[in-house]
Image: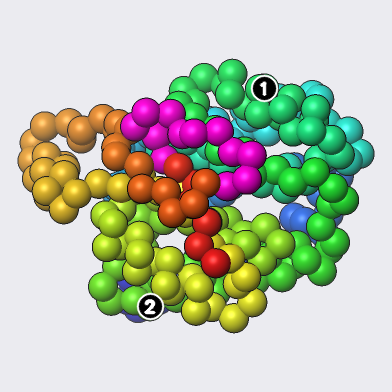
Amino acid sequence: MTTTSIQRIALALTASAALVAGLSACVPLVVGGAAAVGVGMVATDRRSSGAQIDDQGIELRGGARVREIANDQMYVSITSFNRQVLLTGTVGSEADKRRVEEVVRRVDNVRSVVNELAVGPSSSFQQRSNDTFISGKVKASLLDAKDIFANSFKITTERSTVYLMGLATRRETDRATDIARGVAGVEKVVRVVEVVSEAELANQAAQQGGTGPAPASRSSVPLPPMEPLPGSAPPPAGGASATPVR
């Protein structure tokens, strides 16, 4: 069995598990795959092993802190990639939106937060199921592409809007965006990506292939914004920015 086949099976199992969890969970809060990282993913991920561990801890600790302030109008998803956090879902007020961001921003090792929480009623079960299905299709499509490194990206979908998080070159980011836009059911793609050069990737691969320790993850040049999101603050220097693509 090929590596791609194994990855596709793993994605299907993960999507199924997420859907079952959504059916039975009492607390309406989701973390972005903290328990789904295996040894194979660690070996093929562009993040350092330290960053991968930090991302798991950020998602779990962030989830615990949000639960402490949660109310019946909060449905929050926390996704961390290379120590940068994406908040998606819904809250009942602008005050709750700010509170969620504040408690997550105080979690150890968080470099920046992209707050995409919407104020309004939570998604229906059907919408959440459809979002899970869309995420699975986008991941599978990225794996099928022969000219892109699929593990460069983490996928989150909220109300048919696909969020691409990752550490990738501009070419890879544009290619992944085109692939996601071509998936049935996707209404919009938002990129929360740290863009690196081909030279930086080659240098990282050389260091990781040698006898020395893997290079520490760092903030890279953000993707030049196409159009700032309404009401969004400018990204921190060196951080990833959210750029919508319709």
Q: Position of residue 102 (x, y in %)?
A: 66, 22
Could you tell me which quadrant the C terminus lies in?
bottom right
Q: Looking at the rendered structure, which numbered label has been put on residue 144?
A: 2
Q: 230 or 240, which lies in front?
A: 230
Q: Residue at x 54, y 78 (%)?
A: 183
Above or below, 129 relative to 41: below
Q: Quadrant of residue 162?
A: bottom right
Q: Residue at x 53, y 51 (%)?
A: 36
Q: Quadrant of residue 203?
A: top left
Q: Position of residue 182 (x, y in %)?
A: 49, 79
Q: Looking at the rendered structure, which numbered label has been put on residue 103?
A: 1
Residue type at the position of mark 2? Asp
Q: Is residue 143 left or right of residue 135?
A: left
**Count of numbered circles in the view:** 2
Q: 64 or 165, which lies in front?
A: 165
Q: Which residues are magenta?
A: 229-240
Q: Residue at x 8, y 36 (%)?
A: 211
Q: Is residue 238 left or right of residue 233?
A: left
- Mark nearer the N terminus (1 vs 2): 1
Above or below, 202 relative to 142: above
Can residue 201 be seen here? no
Q: Mark 2: give few (<14), some (14-19) or many (20+) Cα within 10 Å.
A: some
Q: Is residue 59 left or right of residue 52?
A: right
Q: Mark 1: give few (<14), some (14-19) or many (20+) Cα within 10 Å.
A: some
Residue type at the position of mark 1? Val
Q: Looking at the rendered structure, which numbered label has been put on residue 1?
A: none
Q: Position of residue 123 (x, y in %)?
A: 81, 57
Q: How is the image coloured?
A: rainbow
Q: Is residue 33 left or right of residue 41?
A: right
